[in-house]
Amino acid sequence: MVVATAALLLSTLLLFTFFFFRRSRRRSEPPLDKGRVPWLGHALEFGRDAAQFLNRMKHKHGDIFTVCVAGHYVTVLLDSNCYEAVLKDTQSLDLRRYAQVLMERIFSLRLPNHDPESEKMMMEKQFKGSHLTQLCRSMQKNLNFLLASETTQNPAEWKKDRLFNFCYNVLFKAGYLTLFGTKNNNCAELTEVYEEFRRFDKLLAKLARRSVQKGEMTIASSARERLWDLLCPAWLAKGAEPESWLQAYLHHLNEQSLDSHTQRRALLLQLWVTQGNAGPAAFWLLGFLLTHPKAMRAVREELQGLQHLPLDERENTPVFNSALKETLRLTAAALITRDVVQEKTVRLSSGREYTLRRGDRLCLFPFLSPQMDPLIHSEPEKFKFDRFLNADGTAKSEFFKEGLKMRYGTMPWGAGSNLCPGRHFAISALKQFVFIFLKQFDLELCDRNASMPPVDSSRYGFGILQPDGDLEIRYRPRK
Ligand code: HEM
């Protein structure tokens, strides 16, 4: 037995070592960095803090390089001016395979007839035009309802909370009621969905990297199973409003002939996609405003000027828009991943061409470039609420890197075929939340000298970052 185990271990090690040393850089391929550990390569550093690791590699190799990560060769492209052109090539770059890997690891979900193109079309239709107007109205109503319930019996009394918890709670519940809400909702259930979701969301990055420990797996599985129960498709279908997003999505699932178990799992995936980013984004936005009094004053002044207009007519808000863009520049950190299914040539802005090898993966990381690139944004790590404003107060959209005009100064919503279909809804929800909250409540930090907590570095790659810590706040209704 001992001999057999030792032989198995040895042969596995030999296999890994063979795989590792066999790979060498071909002419015209990007610089190759395999790391020191056979097979594992840079996996540990990548998982611990992807931004720090990729920044280190960028300084070493430039805007394109290939690294070994847990048995995969991943080419990282950081020249943002060619992201869109690269993503357009759906013949050579496949988005399905890696998406399926993540769906299975995180949501235990397999969609055999999954057609991302038709799903994308359905989503885009549901988040624009009259559907979008309806969703924004419903969100406004739900935010008003939830924020009104925050008032205490004695309105002069301050209520204390942690800002991340407060923002995630309100945005999640309002978003859930808007998209998944039915005639049958009740408050206790809403709270249960939120609490189970937070337990699950805390372990999401670990599930994706398969680094959950035994106890954590028990928590993740029980939260996931409870959420599957709460998201029962038959029950949701009975209460869904006609022509709503929920009804369209359930119809889309039925068209794929999925059984009810699979439908529940798909609904949890959608719950995360639609509710996992807005709450954390609201935290960063309010947190930056609270810790930057000049920015808070500028946003309040703009809000003051709009007081007499109904909420849905408050379109012209350049100061708020700039503060939100700046917040998302600093905290939106999704990785865009594709499988290279046939050899492909990538042409960088410099004109230099590189070949991507079939079987490798390609990763784009807008967080590092353009968002945190010091050659595009001065002092990129600092929050400057007016970074996206021109001197005359209009929206600034032109950014340059060493004299070269950049297509985008920030890309929180992804790029090309990866663009978030819910972005207009998300912007509207964040604006409504901040405006209603600042208008109806006094809000301050419990400790006036508190500063923003650092980011939880394990969340790079999964949408909006989350903090490692929180900010204590207190609030009460305005007189
Ligand atoms: C600040 C908030 C948000 C940010 C920064 C954001 C960003 C993104 C990004 C980068 C993607 C592409 C991810 C990928 O394919 O790997 C994405 C996808 C998506 N987002 Fe958002 N999002 C936000 C909020 C929302 C909201 C509120 C909704 C809807 C209510 C939404 C709906 C979607 C959907 C349905 C997809 C999937 C598209 C697909 O399957 O290809 N997002 N989002």
Image: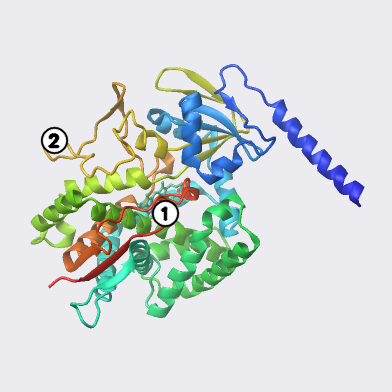
- What is the quadrant of residue 404 in the picture? top left
Residue 48 is left or right of residue 83, and the answer is right
The amino acid type, in three-letter code, at marker 2 is: Ala
Q: Residue at x 50, y 65 (%)?
A: 199
Classed neighbour count for the residue bearing mark 2: other residues with Cα under 10 Å, few (<14), some (14–19), many (≥20): few
User: SS at mark 1?
Assistant: loop
Q: Position of residue 7 (x, y in %)?
A: 87, 43
Q: Position of residue 478 (x, y in %)?
A: 15, 70
Query: Closer to the camera, 456 or 371?
Result: 456
Classed neighbour count for the residue bearing mark 1: other residues with Cα under 10 Å, few (<14), some (14–19), many (≥20): many
The residue that disc 2 covers is: 391
- The answer to whether residue 345 shows anywhere in this view is yes
Q: Residue at x 24, y 69 (%)?
A: 475
Q: Position of residue 166 (x, y in %)?
A: 34, 66
Residue that protrudes farthest toward the bottom in the picture: 153
Tell me which label, 2 or 1, sits earlier in the chain: 2
Label disc, if present, on residue 466 of the rendered structure:
1
Q: Is residue 1 above or below residue 194?
A: above
Query: Closer to the camera, 348 or 206?
Result: 206
